[in-house]
Image (tube, grey):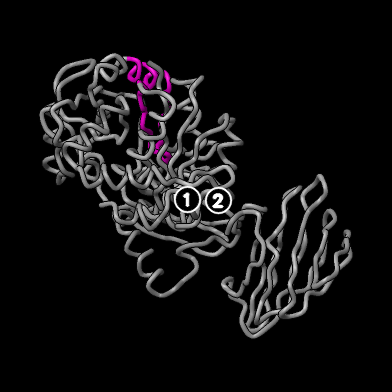
């Protein structure tokens, strides 16, 4: 029986704001090392199942970034399932199970979150190998992380023994005193969110313990729609599915749950404190990234993404700078960042969702300057890509090409605009921008008008199905 890796990529990572945003969450970021967390998960899957076709479940908003990062990581023809709405892990894994069974009736799923860090890949592969025989016989395997400190942010699993062991109890996130006792007793493990089981065994247990999730997921999968490189789950069907984690829906109820201990230098990177712990440190115990200047600073995490950050006389702090936002927080407060992001959303602040540089399936745009009635952007269009045929009600645009050659549609005319040339798009005129060349097209766009919001777009044709 072969292993089919399943990567879940639906999280928003709000606790790592301002680097992680809802439109570009932590799994799509390079937080440790050059590769993103998603790409690291892809390589992790390839380590234990090099010849298997990978299944990935993500949401609609991230689909193009996910597909591009999978391509960069060398994932061969992955199956990408698009959830129209988030319904937690139990339904997402059910969709992947139905997909795996469509081509392999004995498929063993290895379910991997896309936003974790595992440094010891050899230990990870050994643990997967140890659990595979039991999974093939119908056990539902979870991997328990061997703890090295009393963490209060993780759920725990109580189990005894080595290899594949019986689970005595799933435990909610403890307080500090309880976590310290768990660490001392030595029979408690962090719940990693990594699972392995036969696809049919999981669905059988899901049907027995959460039949409403099983039926809703099955109904949604049966009417999935192919869209470009993606398989879409219709929202009108899937939205009726209850939202529940695999732990609550299945693992805490089944009699077939087993655990494999995993000591692989693991972290879920769920907070800036966790990232500080995972990073290498300087002689003053600071973890640093980017252009940083320190004096009399200790036990801090300092990240500079776009400019010099200077810090003086500070300890035990998290300092994170991006092009449009800065976070300064004491380490003890980092678990409360989600509340800060919620306030930004309530106030309608773009910084909760988007970075200054925004990625699109055709390339990217970056806001450079904005005032009351004008906005300046830098736009990059990939070779062979094009923006939609569109129109704006409230703004005109002036394009100045600085690299490459643009093919422009403006009203009923089509023409080329080369480097150091420009063109004007009047308000209310249908237009399209294309890069028919072999290098990136870069241009400066100057918008002017009474309203410059991104929602002032009427699309007439779009190859990306937006």
Q: Position of residue 76 (x, y in %)?
A: 57, 29
Residue named by callout 1: 302
| In the image: residue 291, left or right of residue 397 | left
Quarter of the image containing the C terminus?
Answer: bottom right
Q: Is residue 444 above or below residue 403?
A: below
Q: Position of residue 297 (x, y in %)?
A: 43, 50
Question: Residue drawn at (38%, 63%), measured in percent from left and top?
Answer: 341
Q: CA distance from mark 2 to mark 1?
A: 7 Å
Residue named by callout 2: 292
200 or 53: nearer the eye?
A: 200
Q: Report crowding for label 2: few under 14, some 14 to 19, many 20 or more residues within 10 A (C-alpha).
A: some
Give the magenta-colored segment's residue range.
106-129
**CB contact under 8 Å: marks 2 and 1:** yes
333 or 376: nearer the eye?
A: 376
Quarter of the image containing the N terminus?
Answer: top left
Q: Is 424 one of the magenta-colored residues?
A: no
Q: Secondary structure at mark 2?
A: strand
Q: Report crowding for label 1: few under 14, some 14 to 19, many 20 or more residues within 10 A (C-alpha).
A: many
Q: Mark 1 or mark 2, which is nearer the start of the sequence?
A: 2
Q: Position of residue 188 (x, y in %)?
A: 16, 30
Question: Residue drawn at (36%, 27%), measured in percent from left and top?
Answer: 109
Q: Secondary structure at mark 1?
A: strand
């Amino acid at each position: 029986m072969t292993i089919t890796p399943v990567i879940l990529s639906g999280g928003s990572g709000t606790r790592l704001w301002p680097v992680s945003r809802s439109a570009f969450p932590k799994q799509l970021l390079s937080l440790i090392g050059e590769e993103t967390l998603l790409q690291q998960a892809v390589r992790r899957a390839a380590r234990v199942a090099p010849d298997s076709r990978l299944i990935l479940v993500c949401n609609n908003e991230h689909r193009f970034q996910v597909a591009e990062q999978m391509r960069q990581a060398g994932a061969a023809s992955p199956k990408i399932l698009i959830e129209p709405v988030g319904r937690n892990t139990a339904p997402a894994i059910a969709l992947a199970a139905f997909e795996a069974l469509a081509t392999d009736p004995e498929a063993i799923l290895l379910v991997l979150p896309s936003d974790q860090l595992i440094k010891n890949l050899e230990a990870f592969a050994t643990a997967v190998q140890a659990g595979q025989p039991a999974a093939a016989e119908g056990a539902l395997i979870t991997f328990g992380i061997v703890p090295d400190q009393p963490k209060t942010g993780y759920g725990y699993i109580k189990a005894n023994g080595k290899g594949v062991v019986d689970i005595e109890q799933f435990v909610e996130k403890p307080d500090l005193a309880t976590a310290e006792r768990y660490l001392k007793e030595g029979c408690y493990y962090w719940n990693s969110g990594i699972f392995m089981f036969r696809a049919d065994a999981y669905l059988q247990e899901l049907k027995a313990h959460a039949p409403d999730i099983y039926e809703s997921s099955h109904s949604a999968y049966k009417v999935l729609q192919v869209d470009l490189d993606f398989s879409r789950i219709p929202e009108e069907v899937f939205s009726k599915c209850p939202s529940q984690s695999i732990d609550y829906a299945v693992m805490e109820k089944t009699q077939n749950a087993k655990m494999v201990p995993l000591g692989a230098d693991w972290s879920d990177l769920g907070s800036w404190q966790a990232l500080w712990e995972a990073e290498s440190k300087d002689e003053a115990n600071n973890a640093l990234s980017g252009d940083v200047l320190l004096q009399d600073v200790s036990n801090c995490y300092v990240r500079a993404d776009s400019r010099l950050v200077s810090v003086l006389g500070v300890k035990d702090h998290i300092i994170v700078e991006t092009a449009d936002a800065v976070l300064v927080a004491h380490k003890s407060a980092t678990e409360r960042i989600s509340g800060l992001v919620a306030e930004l959303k309530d106030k309608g602040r773009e910084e909760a969702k988007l970075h200054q540089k925004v990625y699109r399936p055709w390339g990217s745009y970056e806001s450079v300057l904005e005032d009351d009635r004008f906005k300046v952007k830098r736009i990059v269009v990939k070779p062979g890509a094009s923006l939609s045929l569109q129109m704006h009600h409230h703004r005109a645009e002036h394009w100045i090409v600085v690299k490459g050659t643009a093919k422009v549609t403006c009203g009923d005319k089509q023409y080329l605009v080369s480097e150091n040339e420009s063109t004007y798009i009047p308000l209310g005129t249908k237009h399209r921008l294309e890069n028919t060349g072999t290098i990136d097209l870069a241009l400066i766009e100057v918008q002017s008008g009474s309203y410059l919001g991104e929602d002032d777009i009427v699309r007439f044709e779009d190859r990306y199905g937006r």
